[in-house]
Amino acid sequence: MNCLPTDKLSIRACILYEALEHLNDEKYVYSNICRTFGYHLINFQEFNHWYSRFQNGNLELCDESKDVGGHPKKLQDSPALIRTCIFYELLRFTTKSVEYNYKNFTNILGFDVISYQLFDYWFYKFYNQLNNSEKLDLNIDDSFEYVPIPFANLPNDILCEILDKVNAYQKLSIRTMSRKLCQLIDNHILKVDKIELYQSNLHGLYRVIIGYDAIRVVYENTEVGGCTRSVMVAKTKIEGKSCTEMTLEFLSEKLKHPKMQIKRFCIEADNSNFIASVLKVLKSRKTILCVKEISIDGLEECQMAEMLSCVKPRTLEKIVLQKNYDENQTIELKEIVQLEQWKYAKELVTEFNDGAIAVRYQDYCHFDKISVKLARFPKEDFYNIRDILTSRSSFQEAKFQFPRIELHQISELFNLGTYQKEEFEYPGIETFYNHEFNGRFRVSIRPSRLLITPVKQ
């Protein structure tokens, strides 16, 4: 039951409200009115009289003058009728937000009829009355004065309930509103799904793309100085600040939370100044950044090491290192393999195109899951890698690429030990050998690839 008042003025006010929105659709308006009030309260002849009257520009709600009977001539003259229209608007769009309903309401009656704060108050008052099946009372004391409460002054339990419903990006914006909100948000862990930084300089256009969960922000330098900022479909021109400066301001604000936990942090860049600036922001944090997976693309070895050192060891589980290297170029990763972040991570992926890493097997066999391209692959390393990896219950998978080994050398490898050799040849595909080891692991090897995986029981 909708509890709408059924006096003549209320019905006329709702007819006017509908007519102002649907001026040339009488049947649709009549159907809406009857659906809301009931078909027995107003007949079509009476409805047609008032609809035609409003359609012709006469917006008065009574035939007689205001002095006769004391009825208001216009909808805007009666707070009670305005509230009736607010409730009517709620009934029409029960699943829509208060912002949507207010926008629609003001499009029909104008912005000067009621403020957003007052509309918000009555909207939720009626919403709660409707859900609780309470009696609707529109005729309250006119001396009532709406006193808004600043958001930051709400009780902490209510603020926490509200903050639980907003995403990380929104929380970090709310965090800047007041010291109280900052402390309240900072006292709780903030989980961020991903932060991505992509810097490029294609055809002279310097651009930075920032991905923050579902939000995508793009900064581009302009030819006349300054830059532009694009968020979703909105584009803003910023004078006097470069693309890099705006990116750093954004990161400084969005990375300040002391208990932030990031599932995936990615950076792809080749500009030394940009990389140095990002590192400066990361190092300026009061607490070291908690990241579960980090992906670094385009940085030099020393920059990769510095970037890894900015995240918390033991929390970091996956490391992805990428860069375009020339053919046969060797990457030693001397600084990186000494870091605790490297030693305690569980998964490693390196993608260096034609380049390959020259790292002792002892420095990468602690990973439970690994995918690397090796500069060299001595016979002795094969057995050491196999035995170390397969001795751990947590081991998941190992993929190795290495310089090509002749088939007879592979055969020699597998003729040693307790392997039962099976050889498969397919047209157009390199010959490879498939073996089971200790009944728990499968070893597949081609002239330039090795794959070790646990056998599913």
Image: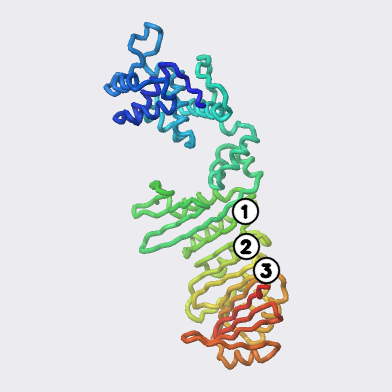
Q: Residue at x 47, y 19 (%)?
A: 5
Instruction: Indicate which label's residue lies in the foreground, 1 or 3.
Output: 1
Question: Circle 2 — which element?
Answer: loop
Instruction: Indicate which label's residue lies in the foreground, 3 or 2.
Output: 3
Residue linked to disc 2: 309
Q: Is residue 79 visible?
A: no
Q: Residue at x 34, y 27 (%)?
A: 20
Q: Residue at x 48, y 34 (%)?
A: 94
Quadrant of the image occupied by residue 157: top right
Instruction: Indicate which label's residue lies in the foreground, 2 or 1.
Output: 1
Q: Is residue 113 visible?
A: yes
Instruction: Using a 10 Å C-alpha cutoff, classify the residue at mark 3 as few (fewer than 14 neighbours), some (14 to 19) or many (20 or more).
Output: some
The residues bearing labels 3 and 2 have C-alpha atoms spaced at a distance of 12 Å
**Contact, CB < 8 Å: mark 2 with mark 1?**
no
Name which of mark 1 and mark 3 comes first in the sequence. Answer: 1
Q: Residue at x 57, y 24 (%)?
A: 134
**Residue 258: percent from the left, percent from the top?**
63, 49
Residue linked to disc 3: 343
Name which of mark 2 and mark 1 comes first in the sequence. Answer: 1
Which one is nearer the viewer's eye here, 331 or 110?
110
Question: Circle 1 — which element?
Answer: strand
Residue linked to disc 1: 261
* Kind of residue sitting beneath label 1: Gln
**Residue 10: percent from the left, percent from the top?**
42, 19
Name which of mark 3 and mark 2 comes first in the sequence. Answer: 2
* Kind of residue sitting beneath label 2: Ser
242, above or below 14, in the image: below
Which one is nearer the viewer's eye here, 10 or 100?
10
Quadrant of the image occupied by residue 209: bottom left
**Residue 437: percent from the left, percent from the top?**
68, 82
Please give left or right for residue 103 compared with residue 169 in the image.
left
* Kind of residue sitting beneath label 3: Lys
